[in-house]
Amino acid sequence: MRGLEEEQQYAGRCGDALRAMIAGARENVVVGEVTWGDRYTAERLGYYLKSLARELGDEGDSPPFFGRIAYGTDESAGEHRGQAYYLGRRHISDAIGRPPLVIDWRAPVSTAFYRAGTRDPQGVAVRRRYGWSNTTLTGYEDEHLPQPDTQVSGGAAAVEAGAGGTGVGAGLGGHGVGAGPGEHGVGAGLGGQGLAGSGVPGVGGILRAEIERPRVGPMRDIVATIQPDQDELVRAELEQSICVQGAPGTGKTAVGLHRAAYLLYVHRARLQRNGVLVLGPNRAFLHYISAVLPTLGEMDVEQTTVDDLLIGEKVKVRATDEAEAALVKHDGRMADVLRRALYGRLRAPRDAVVVPDSSYRWRVNQYEFEEMVEDARAEATAYGIGRERVISRLVAALQRQAETRGQNCNGVWLRKMARAVTPAVDEAWPAVKADEVLAEFLSDPSQASDGILSEREQAAIAWKRSRKPASALWTAADLVLLDEVSALLGRGPSYGHVIIDEAQDLSPMQCRAIARRSEHGSITVLGDLAQGTTPWATRDWAEQLIYLGKPEAEVIALTTGYRVPAAVVAITNRLLAGLRTKVPATRSFRTDGRYTLTKTNDLAGTCVDAVRAALKEEGSVGVIAADDAIADLTAALQQDGIETVHTDGDGRVAVVPASLAKGLEYDHVIAVEPAAIVDAEARGLNRLYVVLTRAVSRLDVLHHRPLPDELG
Ligand SMILES: Nc1ncnc2c1ncn2[C@@H]1O[C@H](COP(=O)(O)OP(=O)(O)OP(=O)(O)O)[C@@H](O)[C@H]1O
């Protein structure tokens, strides 16, 4: 096996090769600019080369590899017998035709790095993980896996640069998006931690240090440390839809993003055509995760919220629904109601269609016309297509008559006939727009919803007076309804793969909007029933998967939390009993961490003190409180000279409304007045569960009012 010096030389060689690749890509951009032929090719190629140059350029600041697997000489190693491979964020090669110096983490051969274990070594004899300080290789750690033909059992050994190891940084070379230099290797001396005591077998110092490394700035990738259960989800087949029920901090979001990168690598051509879509709960969350895919080399993945996805309807939200109205509008029964509102416009034809054409009068009888309408309706395609079919069948009937009379029915004639039958079709199958249908429905819901919605429900959604689309005061829930009606009118495109985060919070109608966009593709559903906070949050994945159009998706649980430390998990698991959902408790990977509880008469003052104390330690600080307490807390902190940022700002101290904390994390969380967080909404206890599970290392709970029973 190579020693540290040889490894450092190899790292140098990879660095040189990478620089040559960057120079080559840049040169291609320049050469391309001179030699491109037509404009379309020029644009596509230019875009590709420029992004490649940019990606590779970004790559230059991060370690070239993070791990290595050396196969044994036994048969179980198969074609890899005696081989060793370095793994990194992307392939690095120094010459065409020679094996790459570093293999992309997504390539099939990399799988063994993530999955090989003492029980199933998969032919691997030694797994090596590297410690880096920026781009300098500072050490490595070997894990020896049992070999069938020898007596070697599992074990580990670490090597690091310099003597004693004090102060030698050994991060795994995370990309450190936006974190500035020196981020890798913070507080991760290699010699300091043994394998014992981690609670997770075979977890060495470098791996543990990476997972426990303080968080600063946006979310980062986890390619170097993806765990076996996570890896199986990341590399699930493209055709397979999966649903991950993951406890807080189990890496659901990370898994989803890495899955997107993996699928794009393996099925690039197919997915670039149809697209991959990532849906998150709000913009603050999207900001937080936005850097992960670009660091994994994927620039083209669309990342958006469900609301923004629907704003494709080009309608402005100008009003807010009462809680009861929103609940009705998000209910799955609205799908039937809207279908009825739309198809209620069809009228059985009362007359024949008669079209004068020079000396003839062509005719389709009333009963034939009626049959055409009924047939088109029964074919259950979109409303707009149904209408088109009626028109073309009428024209075809006229054409048959005309041709029997020897008439030449050319394109001009056919278009003339189509125009001639349109007024009759307008009566029977009117052309409509989605906003007209919805405005008319909300002006008077009774006709379409009698027998489906109760009178009270109808009253809750009915407008006080009837309005036309132009003057309608649309709400966010109306966008979901407009989307439903638009889809009834005509189908939109479908993505190749859709990844849905915090999926427990989606309403049936939102799920349907997503289902339409993934009709011909697959989905990855990520969520936690215990973190459901919307009034319509589901308590059952099977039901949600039906609305998402993938009832066959397998539900897989992740229970090992990589964020919240054991001391905090002990508290948050206690809340589970009060949440009315059946989910497995979290088991923390992390043994570090601290929890404090403080009763105070001066919440703002105590909060300022707590932030001051937190700032003495490393990492980000999140003050999380009920939404209506945010302004006062921010003012108190700023008066004391502490700089604060909003949820989606980048800075050390964020003051975060409880309603926006979902999906985010802070090294140090100061949760202010739990009782107020619980009282603020119907699923307040779930919200509190979300808030307390944002802590990466330390959680301080400050309260004046009595604590909720589950916490007390
Ligand atoms: N294998 C891993 N190696 C290193 N860090 C990891 C790993 N898995 C997860 N993490 C880290 O744990 C934290 C939680 O991950 P993530 O946000 O993806 O979890 P989640 O399940 O979506 O959480 P929640 O539901 O609470 O929002 C992140 O900082 C993530 O980088």
Image (cartoon, grey):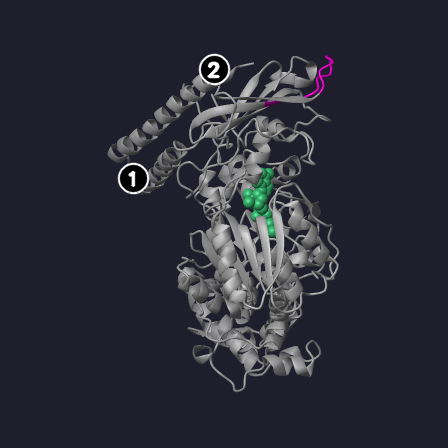
Report the quarter where the N terminus lies: top right
**Residue 126 belongs to the span the image colors magenta:** no
The label shown at residue 476 is none
Residue matched to label 1: 38
The label shown at residue 6 is 2
How many tags in the picture? 2
Relative depth, front residue between 706 and 454: 706
Q: CA distance from mark 2 to mark 1?
A: 49 Å
Q: Secondary structure at mark 1?
A: loop
* Figure quarter occupied by ligand 1: top right
Quadrant of the rendered image containing residue 690: bottom right
Q: Main secondary structure of the magenta part?
A: loop
Relative depth, front residue between 401 and 531: 531
Q: Earlier in the sequence, mark 2 or mark 1?
A: 2
107 shown above or below 533 = above
Relative depth, front residue between 154 and 84: 154
Does residue 711 appear left or right of residue 405 in this picture? right
Amino acid on which disc 1 is placed: Asp
Q: Residue at x 68, y 80 (%)?
A: 450
Q: Which residues are magenta?
A: 142-153
